[in-house]
Amino acid sequence: MLDLSIVVPLYNEEESVTPLYRSIRATLESVECDAEIIFVDDGSRDATFSIAEKLAATDPRLRVIKFRRNYGQTPAMAAGIDISRGKIIVTMDGDLQNDPADIPSFLQKMEEGYDIVVGWRFNRKDRLISRRLPSRVANWLIGKVTGVSIKDDGCSLKAFRADIIKRVPLYSEMHRFIPAMASITGPRLVEIKVRHHARQFGKSKYGLSRVYKVLLDLLTIRMIVGFSARPLAWFATLAVPFFLLSSLMVLWVVWKFLADGYLSLTVSGAALFYATMSVFLIFSGAVGELINHTAEQNVSRFSLLTATEVTVDNTASPIDRTQVRKNE
C-alpha cells in the first residue's frame, strides 16, 4: 500500500494540467514517501485528457481516469478516491488555485494524529460578490446545521485517512460536506491556512447557480447525521404533526357529538388514520434505535477484537506483522 494518493478532478483544464503536474511532482520530490497522482478527467471537451495521458506515459506515478461525459466534481473525486491506494488521500482542484506546496503541511498534521485536515483559503483571490460572499454565508449555514464548524468548507484541498474517506458516500455536490459526513465516526479534525492563487486559465465552473444544490445537499446531510445519532427523536418529531392533527379532530368530533348529537364518520376516520400514522412513526423510530444500538455494539466488539489481534502480533516477527496488516 502506498503512503500518499493525490486526487485531482479536471474539467476543461488543458492549460492547467501540465503546470499542475509539474508543481505536484516538485512537491513529491521534497516529501519522502511512496506516492501516486490520480487525475480524473470529468468529461472534458478540450485536450485535457490527451495532455494528461501523455504525462502519464512518462511517469508511472501518474494515473488518469476519463469519464465519458461530465458528471460533476463530486463523482470525479469519488472515482479517484475509490481507486486510490494510499494510506493518506489528498484532494485538490485542478485549476492551479490550490497550491501543491501546501501538501507537506497536511502530512505533518496527519503525523500528529489527525484524521482529517481541511484547508482554509484565508487570503482568497476570488470575486467578492459571486464567490467569497456566498461562500461565507454557506460556511456559516453548514456549521450551524451540521454542528461541524469549518471556516472554508468549499476548499477542495483536504487530507483524509483512507480508511475514513472510503466509507463516506459521495454524490451530488457533497464533497464539501465530507467533514460533516465523517463526523459520524468521530474523527480528529483540524483546519490549517493554505495559499490561494487567482485563476490563470479558463473559466470558473462555480457560481450562484449551485446555491440551490448546496441547500438541498445540506438538508440531506442534516437528516443523515441527525438520524444516525437519534433515530427515535427524528421519527418522534415527524409523528408530532400527525398526533396533533388527530387530537384536534377527535376533540371536534366529541364536541360535535355532545352539542348536536352528530357523529362525522369522515372526520373520525381521518383522526384514526393520523393517530395510526403517529404510532407507526414512533415504533419505526424505536426499531431504528434498536438497529443503531446493535450496530454500535458490533462495531465495539470488532474494535476490541482488532486491538487484541494487534497486541498479540506485536510479539511476532516483522514478516508476520506485515502479513497481518495485509490480511486486515
Image (cartoon, rainbow, N blue to C red):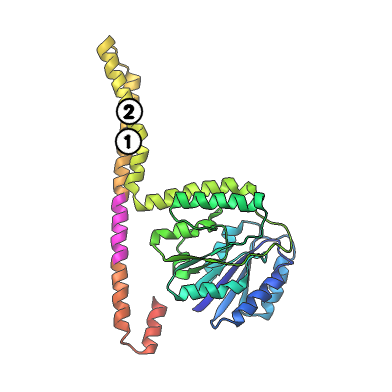
Magenta-colored segment: predominant secondary structure: helix
Amino acid type, label 2: Ser
Considering every residue shown, the one lying at the far left of the view is 258
User: Is residue 24 shown above or below 123?
Assistant: below
| Residue stretch in magenta | 289-300
Q: Is residue 15 left or right of residue 319?
A: right
Residue 65, image quadrant: bottom right
Q: Is residue 135 left or right of residue 293?
A: right
Q: Are marks 1 and 2 in contact (CB under 8 Å)?
A: yes
Question: Looking at the image, which residue is at 30% across and 41% down?
Answer: 282
Q: CA distance from mark 1 to mark 2?
A: 9 Å
Res 86 visible: no
Residue hosting label 1: 278
User: Is residue 327 shown above or below 139?
Assistant: below
Question: Looking at the image, which residue is at 33% across and 45% down?
Answer: 233
- Does 293 appear in magenta? yes
Amino acid type, label 1: Ser
Q: Nearer the viewer, residue 300 or 209?
A: 209
| Picture coordinates of residue 226, whole percent (x, y) | 39, 50
Is the residue marked by circle 2 packed among few (<14), some (14-19), or many (20+) residues within 10 Å? many
Q: Which mark is residue 112?
A: none
Q: Which mark is residue 246?
A: 2
Secondary structure beneath dot 2 equals: helix
Question: Looking at the image, which residue is at 39% across and 83% down?
Answer: 323
Q: Is residue 301 left or right of residue 197?
A: left
| Picture coordinates of residue 108, whole percent (x, y) | 50, 75
